[in-house]
Image (cartoon, rainbow, N blue to C red):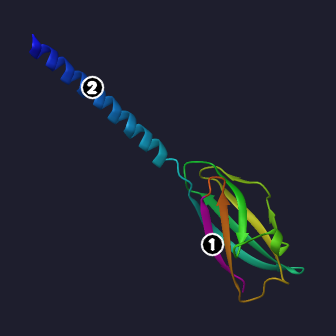
Amino acid sequence: MEESYVTIVIIAITITLAFVTVYWLISIQSVTTEFEHLEVINQEVAEDNGHFEIKVTIENKGVKDVSIDDVLINGRTLDEYKSSITPQDIEIKPGEKIQIKIKLSKSEFDHGQLVHIKFISAKGNEFPILIYIP
């Protein structure tokens, strides 16, 4: 009779461990499959009335919507450079491409300069690119 109790306890522990393992694997899978991945498809620089206009085409290669909360130019905000960005609110769905226009003042930037642009998502992920002003 005691052997049957031991067998029942061992089976119960085995089933419990199986459920815990499955739950753990599902939670890991949901965390690792929800990532943000932006890729620069094209970038152009043109001169425009006292400004350099940078056009960057970005594609969301990830599986989640990416919302850009901040853009830094050489580690500083756009306001510090008296620069502007279009569109203001950037949200990119998976598989979607978007063109972002950044106007930089010629008083702050010059020909032959490298510009480090960093897009920062709402989740805090950073997507840096380097652009050369010809």
The boundaries of the magenta stretch are 125-134
Give the camera-side residue of 33 and 21.
21
Tell whether 73 sits left or right of 127.
Answer: right
Return the mark for residue 70. Answer: none
Q: Is residue 127 magenta?
A: yes
Compared with residue 33, is residue 7 higher up or lower down, i.e. above or below? above
- Label 2 sits on a secondary structure element that is helix
Q: Mark 2 highlights which residue?
A: 15
- Check disc 2 and give the amino acid type: Ile
Q: Nearer the viewer, residue 92 or 127?
A: 127
| Residue 75: % across, % down | 69, 73
Specify the amino acid type for callout 1: Ile
As drawn, the label of residue 129 is 1
Residue 118 drawn at (x, y percent)? 66, 68
Tell me what residue is drawn at x 79 percent, y 59 percent: 87
Check disc 2: other Cα within 10 Å, few if <14, some if 14-19, many if 20+.
few
Quadrant housing residue 22: top left
Determine if the magenta segment contains residue 101.
no
Badge 1 local density, few (<14 within 10 Å), some, or many (20+)?
some
Q: Which of pointers 1 and 2 indicates the residue nearer the eye?
A: 2
Pointer 1 or 2: first along the chain: 2
